[in-house]
Structures are given as C-alpha cells and as structure tokens.
Image (cartoon, rainbow, N blue to C red):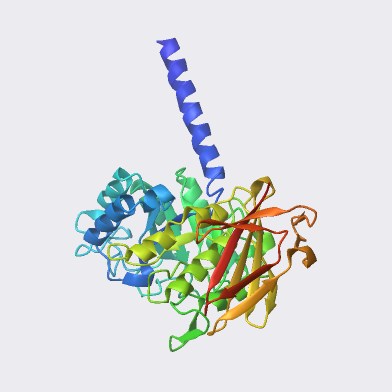
Amino acid sequence: MKINNWILTGISVFCMTLQAQNKENLLLTPPMGWNSWNTFHTDISEKMVMETADILVSSGMKDAGYIYLVLDDGWMAMERDKEGNLVPDPQKFPRGMKFVADYVHSKGLKFGMYNCAGTMTCQKYPGTRGYEYQDARNYAAWDIDFLKYDWCFTTGINAKEAYQTMSNALKKTERPIVFSICEWGVNKPWEWGEGIGQMWRTTEDIYQIFDSVHDEGTWNSLSVMHIADLQSNLRKYSGPGHWNDPDMLEVGNGMTYNEDKAHFSLWSMMAAPLMAGNDIRKMSKQTLEILTNKDVLAVDQDSLGIQGFRYLDKDGLQVWCKPLKNGDWAICFINRKTESKAITFDWSKENIVDEIYKYSLDKNVSYNLFDVWSKKNAGTTAKELKATLEPHGVLMYRLSKS
C-alpha cells in the first residue's frame, strides 16, 4: 500500500510539474486559429461552432496549424444567474459551453472564448469587472484553452491592474489558458503585458480594406496597411510567449486576391497571431490556398520568433525583412499603389541589418531565392532583382545559403 501511495504521489507531482511547464511555455510560436467576430459578430451558435470545427479539420486548416477556435462577443445571456455566474445564451447554446468545448476538443482543436475587463462587453453583455475569479473558475470548468479579454466600459479602471487581476485568476485555476489582452494598444500593453498575457492587441480593430480607414461612427477601424504602419516601433516587445497582435485576418472577406496575399504575407513577416476571420464553411479554394500556404506559414511560425522590420518605404514600395532560423531570411516587397509598379533591387548595394537582434544579410554570400507564392526558385542574390508588382501586389522570398 505504501508503494502504491508513493507511485500515486510521484505521478501527481509529475503531472503538476508538466502542467506548470506547459503554462510557462504557452505560445512559443504565434497562435493560429479562427475567431468568430469579423464575419459573425454576435450572430453565433452551437451549430456554427460545430460546423466550423468540422471544416477546420476537413479543409486541412488544422493540419496547417489552425488549432484555436475562438468565440467572440455575444455567447452569453444578457444577465448573470442568481449566483453571479455567466450563463450561455440558451437559444444560441442550448447544451451549454462544456458541450461545445468537448466537441471542439474531440476534433483535436482548442477552444477559446471572450469577455471584457469592463462592466459590460462591447456589445453590452455582462462584463467581468468584479467577477474575475468566479468567471475564471467557470472557464476552467468548461475546459477552455484561450480567453480574449476586451476593454469596453472601463472608465476609471487601470488597464495593467485589470489585466493582471484576470491573469492571476486564470493562473489560479491551474489550467493552461492563453490570455489575449485586447485593449487596442491604448495603454501600451507591449510595455507591461509580458508575464500577464501571451499576446496583446496593438491597434484598433481591423476592417477588410487595404489602405484607408473605415468610419464606425464614433471611431475608425483600420486597414491592413495602416495597422502595419503602426507596428514598426514595437518589434522589440514581441517574441516567443509574448506576441504583438495586429488583429485578426480579413483574408477571404472581400478584398482582392492581391490584397489578401499581401495581408497574409505582412502578418507572417510580423510574426503575428494568425486568426482567420472569414466564414470558412463557404471559403473559396483560392482563400484556402492563401491561408494554408505552408511556406508563408513557415515564416510566421519560425522558431526564432523575431518580428520582421520595414526596411524600405518609398514611393509606394515597402520592403519588409525578417531573420529566420539557420541563417535564412524572408524578404517581402509590397506595392501600396493602385497601379502596377516596376521595382529594381540590387542585393549587393543594400545593407539589410537587424539592429535589435543583430542579424545581417551577408553581402559576400549568394543566397538562393525561393518565391513562396509561386513555389518556384527565382535565382540568387548575385543578380539584381527586377520585377513588376501588380496594384497592391506582393513578392515574397525565402533566402537561404547554398
């Protein structure tokens, strides 16, 4: 009997140690998954979740790395129950959130949910202010793996303290739950978010436009390029386990094919979380091919975890550079203009240096060029690059030594 007790104690200690290690090692590469907001807003349901989980698997997106299925605002009833617990909307989720989480998990996926640091969510459902530990216990009981935590109705609340409280509540459950800080960059979460959450939004919401703003009435949502512009000074804060989040993907939501490719390329160059925001049940083959391009995904998921930098921004042409493992580089050319643009790039005359992480493109080495979108070898850096970029077009290479 004593031996059995020792064995059980040893197993228990091992499991606790393993769980602690897993919590510390959350998101060593940027998370990939799907979020309901961009397409569905609050029009969500158990049926939609189950269908989306099925398609994540059958389409090949799960195998490509999209493992988090996250429900955004609107999953709960308008009031808490008499014990103060959040209640799933009985019309949308008649069998409750544990049933939904179990179904998602049965597909080999992870399940995420949403709430807000304020008294109400952005759509005026019950917020978590004053209920942090109670809500965290319920999330753990439902076996969720990811919490997106928004910032509406927070007048008079200190952001760092609010997110620290919820972070503590999640850790208290001893369940490894990714904590996504979503206060839109208002309080510079990149300066304090590490150790509190694993990712933090850096801007206002994205919208399915390439290079302007969208008037939301009392605020503006932002375009792909506007958001990219705002990332240039934030890269030193991002890395394994603590990621800058420029918001979810709009691939497949109405932009052109070139714009979708450029958007996906930029987010991968920035080592951004890749959370698809389209209705994947109805997506085109073209959209699926963009989202599952393994060579672009390899740039985003590179184990160095370095956020790329904007090397050149001139006359509508941007050049982004990202050091990769084993001495490789990713180089991305973006045409911001609405007309075609001829480009010339003499590798021997460019001084591509990552000043923060101390990597440099070696001018004395001829790198092989692999076009990650055409899937073709494109010569070497020994030869000057000449190309024409279509309106809002992208050219993206992986550079590797011979």
- Along the line of sight, which residue is nearer the eye, 24 or 293? 293
**Mark count:** 0
Q: Residue at x 35, y 51 (%)?
A: 60
Q: Residue at x 38, y 53 (%)?
A: 61
Q: Is residue 300 visible?
A: yes
Residue 74: x %, y % from top left: 32, 68
Picture layout, residue 336 above or below residue 1: below
- Along the line of sight, which residue is nearer the eye, 332 or 137? 332
Q: Position of 260 compared to 101: left or right? A: right
Residue 367: x %, y % from top left: 69, 53
Residue 69: x %, y % from top left: 37, 56
> Which image quarter: residue 389?
bottom right
Quadrant of the snapshot with the N terminus: top left
Q: Is residue 166 visible?
A: no
Q: Residue at x 29, y 51 (%)?
A: 58
- Along the line of sight, which residue is nearer the eye, 344 or 5? 344
Residue 232: x %, y % from top left: 66, 70
> Which image quarter: residue 319?
bottom right
> Which image quarter: residue 371?
bottom right
